[in-house]
């Protein structure tokens, strides 16, 4: 296991539950195009070459280079060569309830180490995954496993994610709780970070808890976080919507209801205004299963 060299401030991580969503080996399913990634992605080229871009960052690599491609959640554009073959690992982090965010470079190509490669090999070749069909490997959350197999898969997944975090941190990609100086912003940020997605919140009540008006709290948030509480909560809801839409067994109307929308059309309009497409269109796109 790697030794942490991350200087990020300590935080309470008890609610963090990394979960392996996919461990795919073979030709890329989405060879070229723009894809709405909603989880942390690790990609290793076994053959061929790839070009990817995300939020103004671009990388180019090929299978001759011992590197991992690491990508934080969000929309990316990619192109793989015709002969490409990859290992694609998708890990969902859920809601750690401490306000942690991905910061720094959103897409990086990092040199790996022998121990990191060995960890990846242990995951790819562990018995629970070897027993899966190629299609099952695309949707590991739907698997029913004996508890020992589940724990084995979880152990290897956590070891790999730990390595990915350490390598990412060395190259400018971090998953951490924002450093907040103003205790009023820190307190209100923690309140929203730990709020259930089904709970509503009032700007006025949130601000009053810190002895402020809603406008005053908005201004303090912009100084510290470049975002308002309303915008932060909206982003939380959109992230949740995207995560749930990846699970095709959940009806869209159920997701809408969980987010407090009385009518599916309201949810569709809200999602489209923020993501540029309807929930149904998002669900059908490659890379969302």
Image (cartoon, helix red, strand yellow):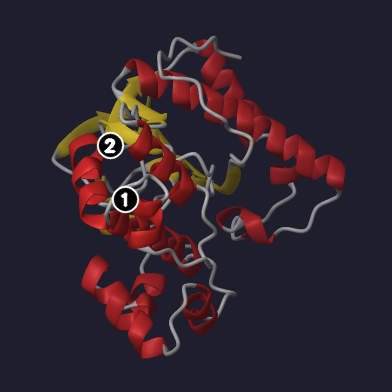
Residue 177 point in image, percent of width and height: 41, 32
Question: Nearer the N terminus, badge 2 or badge 1?
Answer: 1
Q: Does residue 4 sit above or below 127 in this rendering?
A: above
Place residue 224 in its image quadrant: top left
Q: Residues within 10 Å of mark 2 (few under 14, many from 20)?
A: many
**How many numbered marks are there?**
2
166 sits to left or right of 271: right
Q: Residue at x 57, y 28 (%)?
A: 160
Q: Does residue 136 sit above or below 53 in this rendering?
A: below
Query: Can residue 176 be seen?
Result: yes
- Secondary structure beneath disc 2? loop
Is the N terminus in the top left, top right, bottom left or bottom right quadrant? top right
Q: Which mark is residue 106?
A: 2
How far apart in space, not on screen, are marks 2 and 1 (Cα)? 8 Å
Q: Residue at x 70, y 52 (%)?
A: 132
2 sits to left or right of 280: right
Q: Does residue 57 sit above or below 200 in this rendering?
A: above
Residue 131 point in image, percent of width and height: 75, 49
Q: Nearer the viewer, residue 98 or 152?
A: 98
Q: Nearer the viewer, residue 51 or 34?
A: 34
Query: Is there a contact, CB below 8 Å, between mark 2 and mark 1?
Result: yes
111 sits to left or right of 91: left
Q: Residue at x 17, y 36 (%)?
A: 57
Residue 80 point in image, percent of width and height: 28, 46
Residue behind mark 1: 74
Q: Residue at x 41, y 72 (%)?
A: 283
Q: Does residue 133 sit above or below 122 in this rendering?
A: below
Residue 105 point in image, percent of width and height: 25, 31
Q: Nearer the viewer, residue 204 or 283?
A: 204
267 sits to left or right of 117: left
């Amino acid at each position: 296991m790697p030794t942490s060299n991350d200087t990020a401030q300590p935080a309470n991580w008890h609610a963090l539950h990394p979960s392996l969503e996919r461990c795919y080996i073979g030709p890329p399913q989405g060879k070229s195009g723009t894809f709405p990634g909603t989880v942390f992605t690790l990609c290793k080229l076994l053959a061929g070459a790839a070009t990817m871009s995300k939020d103004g960052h671009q990388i180019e690599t090929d299978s001759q280079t011992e590197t991992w491609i690491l990508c934080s959640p969000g929309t990316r554009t990619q192109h793989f060569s015709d002969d490409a073959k990859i290992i694609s690992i998708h890990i969902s982090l859920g809601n750690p309830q401490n306000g942690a965010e991905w910061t720094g470079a959103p897409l990086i190509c990092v040199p790996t180490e022998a121990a990191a490669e060995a960890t990846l090999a242990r995951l790819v070749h562990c018995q629970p995954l070897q027993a899966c069909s190629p299609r099952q490997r695309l949707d590991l959350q739907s698997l029913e496993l004996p508890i020992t197999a589940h724990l084995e898969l979880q152990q290897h997944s956590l070891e790999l994610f730990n390595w990915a975090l350490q390598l990412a941190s060395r190259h400018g990609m971090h998953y951490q709780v924002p450093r907040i100086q103003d205790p009023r912003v820190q307190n209100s940020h923690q309140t929203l970070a730990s709020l259930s997605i089904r709970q509503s919140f009032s700007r006025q009540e949130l601000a009053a808890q810190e002895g402020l008006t809603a406008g005053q709290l908005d201004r303090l948030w912009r100084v510290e976080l470049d975002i308002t509480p309303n915008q932060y909560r909206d982003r939380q809801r959109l992230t949740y919507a995207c995560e749930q839409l990846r699970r095709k067994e959940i009806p869209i109307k159920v997701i809408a209801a969980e987010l407090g929308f009385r009518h599916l059309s309201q949810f569709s309009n809200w999602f489209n205004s923020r993501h540029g497409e309807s929930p149904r269109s998002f669900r059908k796109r490659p890379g969302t299963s």
